Amino acid sequence: MVRRLRRTKKSQKYNYNKNRKRLNKKIHGTGTVKCPEIKNDMDFRKNLNTNISEMGLAFDVNKAIPVPNTKRERAKLARYVNGFLEEDASDSESEARNPPPKAHVAKRLEKDSKEFVEIRFRLSKGQVQFVTGMIDTYGFNYKAMAADKRNYEQETWRQMRQKVRRFLTIPQQCTPYLKRKGWLDCDMNDPSDPRWKEYGTDDEQ
């Protein structure tokens, strides 16, 4: 038996301030599940890897979609050449016959991902005041905006155009401004309208 040094033994003290029960739950528990679809079908008696696999999801992406292995592919090709085609086909059929028991979770998540999500991006109050002030002063003359002294970040006219267009794609922020200007019934893509003649162009003068 190797005897420990006195210095090491002395430094190892029991920490009475630690809640051992809570620490053990944190280490061995599955953690907080924020996704309601997964949480409703989660069996907390099983570990996280088993739960995710039963739902038809991938716990480890590297294992679910592995990097192609040349040696394994070559061995598989040799099996095909040596006449193990029927055995491999039966293995693949048995895998296909056993879908995960909670596959509806994966289908529900896939359906939710395809649904349209409202744009939640918002510009800050200062950015809105800056953009609206520039439009009030110069209209949609982006080169004049870039030359303004308030453009202390020295943004180019293309960056100014991008900022204005981003502002006009957020209905919650641009609708009150357009209503105040009386532009709600205007067509932004109409070049004949003098108010929007420079909005959709790429070569402002």
Image (spheres, rainbow, N blue to C red):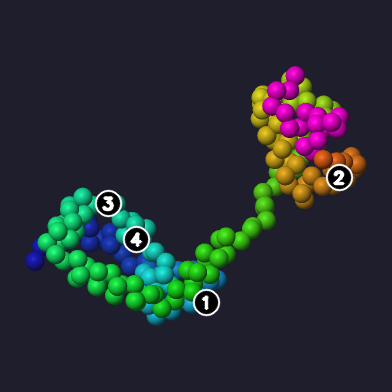
State the image coordinates of residue 69 (x, y, percent, origin top left).
23, 52
Quadrant placement of the N terminus: bottom left
- Which residue corresponds to mark 2? 184
Q: Nearer the viewer, mark 1 or mark 4?
A: 4
Task: Decide which of tag 3 and tag 1 comes sooner along the chain.
Answer: 1
Contact (CB < 8 A) between labels 2 and 3? Answer: no
Helix, strand or loop status at disc 4: helix
Q: Residue at x 37, y 58 (%)?
A: 61
Task: Decide which of tag 2 and tag 3 comes sooner along the chain.
Answer: 3
Task: Decide which of tag 1 and tag 4 comes sooner along the chain.
Answer: 1
For residue 125, the mark is none
- Which residue corresponds to mark 4? 64
- Which residue corresponds to mark 1? 40
Q: CA distance from mark 3 to mark 1?
A: 35 Å
Quadrant placement of the C terminus: top right
Q: Residue at x 77, y 37 (%)?
A: 189
State the image coordinates of residue 143 (x, y, percent, origin top left).
73, 22
Q: Is residue 78 visible?
A: yes
Q: CA distance from mark 1 to mark 4?
A: 24 Å
Magenta span includes 85: no
Q: Relative to 70, is 127 on the left or the right?
A: right
Q: CA distance from mark 2 to mark 3?
A: 56 Å
Q: Nearer the viewer, mark 3 or mark 1?
A: 3
Residues drawn in magenta: 188-205
Helix, strand or loop status at disc 3: loop
Helix, strand or loop status at disc 2: loop
